[in-house]
Image (cartoon, rainbow, N blue to C red):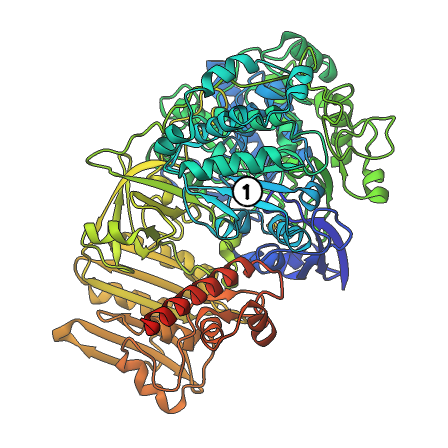
Amino acid sequence: MAETRSTCPYCGVGCGVIIEHDADAGVDAGVDAITGVRGDPEHPANFGKLCSKGSTLHLTLSPVARALYPELRSERASPRRRVSWELALDAAAGKFAQCIREHGPDSVAFYISGQLLTEDYYAFNKLAKGLIGTNNVDTNSRLCMSSAVAGYKATLGADAPPCAYEDIDVAECIFIAGANTAYAHPILFRRIEEARAKNPRLKLIVADPRRTETAAEADLFLQLKPGTDVALFHAMLHVSIAEGLLDETFIAGHTEGFAALRETVRAFTPAAAAEICGVPAADIVQAARWFAESTSTLSLYCQGLNQSAHGTDKNATLINLHLATGQIGKPGAGPFSLTGQPNAMGGREVGGMANLLSAHRDLANPTHRAEVAKLWGIASVPATPGKTAVPLFDALHDGRIKCLWIACTNPAQSMPNQALVREAMTRAEFVVLQECYRDTETAPFADLLLPATTWGEKEGTVTNSERRISRVRAALPAPGEARHDWQVVVDFAQALGQKLGGNNAAALFPYTTPEEIFNEHRESTRGRDLDITGLTYSKLETQGPQQWPYPETAAAGKTRLYADGIFQTADGRARFANAAFIAVTEKTSRHYPLSLNTGRLRDQWHGMSRSGRAAQLYSHAPQAVLSMHPDDIAARGCIDRDLVSIASARGRITLPLESSTDVAPGNVFLPMHWGSRFLKGDGINALTIGTYDERSQQPELKHAAVEVAAADLPWRMVAVAYVADPHETLEALSRSFADFDYASCGFAGREQTAVVFRAAAHTAPSPAQTERFDELLGLRCNPLTFVDTARGIERIAVIDSGQLIALRLCGDISGADWLGEWLENRTDIGPLAWRVLAGGGTPPQGLVHRGRIVCSCHNVAENEIAACFANGGDVDVAQQKLKCGTGCGSCVPELKRMALKFSVASAGAIEELAA
Ligand code: SF4
């Protein structure tokens, strides 16, 4: 066995990982050769820790779903067929060249990804802007971080998060706004927990429309109405002014524009803001005091501010608070935007977006364009701004863009307004998908599929939220015919150059290694705010991951920016943003009276292309559910855990309902992860809106107006089974979604993977349809069967050596939960086999229904933890007895919440008894 140091490919925390793998794995060994992953104790982002997602990376590498060779379809209606790379590149180059010749360079576009490495990103950017002459290159980072970029530039003058993770250790006040850090950036949340344990004075304020696991930890929770963040931040500034909490010296010496802002926030009294935000005025005052009076205040924020039609204002008005109170440029203080994707930062650094140029240069700036043209050795870089994500798909839809190249992203799951996005890809003349997986939601739309390498196979660099550049290293060779992403760009550029004739593709793309690309990118940063001219691959080997800037003269990267109070503006002074408060774009109405909020779960990541392959990652949240306040459920006559239909002006999906007081009345919450591969319909983003912020062009994925109604689907089915190939079976099952009104599928199990299928319909499907399921799930091999035709009940099970291995329940599905547990846990059911066919809501006496898994590392379920608390245990006792929360720690916030609920419940019981 061997070990290779690399970086986690999920979130922007950028944890270092050590990949354990077969040292002698050849090209055909595939990803099975990676046997384990653990945290890198020397990586400064995580010091050896990994969350539930990072620590299960080795379980996500199903070789079955890998794209291993190019596939091309000759006509739209025909299936793709395997072709050689030579033929694939020739076809792509021919199609793109023809389009460029006939319709101009802006008739083609590239939609790439914050999961690409910096070197891949650099190559794509140069391909579009340097070789083809179009700025139509945008990325899924547009859905994630572009409001943070615009917010930083509007106030501090540059897209540079000024803080470092070590600021968490010394902050006296942490303000988390629009971020569920406990779920989305778990390793940072571990750091916050540790800082709080060491420093009891540390105050934690959380602002969020939903009472999340992060909010539950807060000393002060501001449960604001969706979209009212600017009003809240203005009101906090109003209080700081009224109570003399400003840092007047800092304002006078280092900023511009405060007088106008002072006038604007005059109207935002705590009482006025309380009305707008739905937060008690006293809490706004308290938040403002803690923020301003603390010796060091650190703000952490993410999609709750970014994914908004006013995301730039939300970011900038939070930064206003830091500038006005001097909470910036010192240890433990500053506005710290948390990056959603592993390398959204790297993409920004190389200018891989429609409005940016290399090394934080601006496309709109002629001097910057001339500098980049000189660096690349070309006459000019096109001046016309490219199309950002939403306008790009709009242009594909109406034919202005004809050929689209998608790399390492899944727009048929992640883009808002899926109906339009999917129609756009159907209408396109030619769609290329460069992917490591062949089964994402976007794959069916591709005319050409190009197999790419992925995590564990790639070499390059990524930059995390704190500006830290880490090496990504390959543990295994590329499987099949897969090529590295940068390599595909180089190969395509050469082929396209030949087709277009008379250009300098060979000179522009001479690279034979990612290091050569890094070196060119490094040179492009000379003299810029992110200058890394002192950094090389070999320094990253010897010094470890480094923060930028790291100029030639430096001995190491810079931890914290703006300590000197000089900002990246022409006069060195930061700018206050005098933003007006504007409510959410899509107002709730009589037809759509509820505000939909979307967000992340603890154990899934983005569109589940990777995390959705690990059975263990379904144990915490087995399926997508809609969270809704009990009052709203009652008002609609819906039933907790039953199916509901959720509709917006753009689409409709059907899901189970979950009663939750974490969401305020009038709000509902959906996890963002489920797409059409796992759920009938176009996924969660069937509902979301494409409206976007004019400056950042980031869409408002965090809010849509919706209505919810009972689904009234009397026929139900649940099937779960161990099968020879769970991934292929899942693919086959998802092809049957059309037969039902509601259908979802996923995995379950731990040592072995089982497939799970849930469905509902107005009427029962034909016997032929259900027989197909029995075939797929191995239910035709000596099954036990119970059929009650009169009541529409059918139960089929296969038991082998005393263990349940396959099950299908139709009609009455009330025993599905505990029967599923029997199957997953390989319970020896021996004489209780008859109960499988009897079903029923409760398991046989003496057997406990374990419930959802809370601790994924040690496989501890909610009912086991509840029993511990019911017996007087607390979190410490639960950790000692059950080991829950002692692995990656991702479940600790939930354990604390459960303990709190129990203590509140038992206090209530004692009071009741006393009364
Ligand atoms: Fe990966 Fe978790 Fe670290 Fe994010 S916090 S980089 S998902 S291990």
Q: Is residue 61 above or below residue 808?
A: above
Name of the residue lying farthest toward the left:
790
Q: Position of residue 783 (x, y in %)?
A: 32, 80
Foreground pick, 28 / 201: 201
Quadrant of the drawing holding the C terminus: bottom left
Quadrant of the drawing holding the N terminus: bottom right
The three-letter amino acid code for the residue at tag 1 is: Glu
In the shown orientation, is residue 414 left or right of residue 809? right
Residue in the image at 56% along x and 24% along y: 320
Name of the residue lying farthest toward the bottom:
831
Residue bearing mark 1: 435
Q: Is residue 879 above or below residue 436?
A: below
Q: Is residue 620 above or below residue 669?
A: below
Mark 1 packing: few (<14 Cα in 10 Å), some, or many (20+)?
Answer: many
Q: Secondary structure at mark 1?
A: strand
Q: What number of labels is visible?
A: 1
Instruction: Say if residue 94 shows up in the picture.
Output: no
Foreground pick, 138 / 572: 572
Which corner quadrant of the image does residue 362 belong to? Answer: top right
In the shown orientation, is residue 17 left or right of residue 796? right
Q: Position of residue 486 (x, y in %)?
A: 66, 35
Q: Is residue 63 above or below residue 385?
A: below
> Cβ of disc 1 within 8 Å of ligand 1?
no
Which corner quadrant of the image does residue 586 belong to? Answer: top left
Q: Position of residue 178 (x, y in %)?
A: 49, 39
Q: Position of residue 757 (x, y in %)?
A: 35, 62
Which corner quadrant of the image does residue 833 belong to? Answer: bottom left
Foreground pick, 192 / 462: 192
Instruction: Say if residue 33 shows up in the picture.
Output: yes
